[in-house]
Image (tube, grey):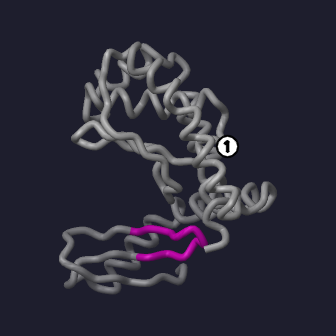
């Protein structure tokens, strides 16, 4: 049995998560027994192993590229603010949408977001991704102005502007964790 930490709360089901160091946390209902928790962990052993292997790959890729300093991150943010206006203008015109405020942050887990008010947020680390991947994230968030969900209509809208969006999503899935790890390695 893998070592784990249990957090009990007023939830209805057992949830298992790993932090970026591979430590296992089990979130469980207040009345959940140790046996139920260990059964859930046994069922999740394959997932835990695969996730730990992925975390090891991400860590190795991040260490190979090197940690980003605060200065590096500030520069990425400034660069992102410089390239965003033209890209937003081009893609918002293609999609026939209007957006609100735009901000750039160094986020731990998100590449972009779109608020109910139409405000857009982007991760400065997108500057380290291939340009087509950055463009995909921009298109993705702009499409949320029409479809505030991930419905078939939403994905059809994304594909209308970015026919290769699946490859760009895969790039983020395969390499995005390493970018995030580089930015937060010094914390």
Residue 30's spot in the image, x, y percent?
21, 83
Image quadrant containing the C terminus: bottom right
Residue found 28% across the figure and 29% down from its top:
145
Q: Is residue 47 above or below residue 11?
A: above
Would you say residue 141 sits in the magenta stretch? no
Residue found 41% across the figure and 13% down from its top:
94
Q: Is residue 26 above or below residue 102?
A: below
What's the magenta region? 16-25
Residue 70's spot in the image, x, y percent?
65, 64
Which residue does the numbered mark 1 point to in the structure image? 128
Where on the picture, by quarter, is residue 32? bottom left
Residue 169's spot in the image, x, y percent?
53, 35
Q: Is residue 178 above or below residue 26?
A: above
Residue found 78% across the figure and 60% down from its top:
66
Q: Nearer the viewer, residue 28 or 182?
A: 182
Where on the picture, by quarter, is residue 182? bottom right
Residue 176's spot in the image, x, y percent?
60, 48
**Element at label 1:** helix
Where on the picture, by quarter, is residue 60? bottom right
The image shows a total of numbered marks equal to 1
Q: Nearer the viewer, residue 149 or 106?
A: 106
Q: Is residue 164 left or right of residue 54?
A: left
Q: Nearer the viewer, residue 178 or 113?
A: 113
* Residue at far right of view: 64
Q: Is residue 34 left or right of residue 9?
A: right
Q: Nearer the viewer, residue 100 or 47?
A: 100
Give neighbour class at mark 1: few <14, some 14-19, many 20+ (Cα, 10 Å).
few
Q: Is residue 175 left or right of residue 48?
A: right
């Amino acid at each position: 049995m893998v070592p784990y930490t249990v957090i009990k709360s007023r939830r209805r089901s057992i949830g298992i998560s790993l932090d970026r160091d591979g430590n296992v946390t089990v979130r469980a209902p207040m009345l959940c027994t140790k046996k139920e928790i260990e059964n859930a962990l046994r069922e999740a052993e394959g997932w835990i192993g695969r996730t730990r292997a992925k975390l090891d790959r991400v860590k190795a890729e991040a260490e190979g590229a090197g940690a980003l300093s605060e200065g590096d991150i500030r520069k990425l943010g400034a660069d992102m603010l410089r390239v965003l206006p033209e890209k937003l203008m081009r893609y918002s015109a293609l999609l026939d949408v209007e957006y609100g405020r735009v901000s750039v942050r160094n986020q731990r887990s998100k590449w972009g977001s779109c608020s109910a008010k139409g405000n857009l947020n982007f991760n400065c680390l997108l500057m380290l991704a291939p340009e087509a991947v950055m463009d995909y994230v921009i298109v993705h968030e702009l499409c949320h102005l029409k479809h505030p969900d991930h419905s078939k209509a939403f994905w059809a809208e994304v594909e209308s502007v970015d026919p290769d969006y699946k490859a760009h999503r895969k790039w983020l899935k395969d390499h995005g964790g390493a970018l995030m790890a580089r930015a937060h390695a010094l914390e």
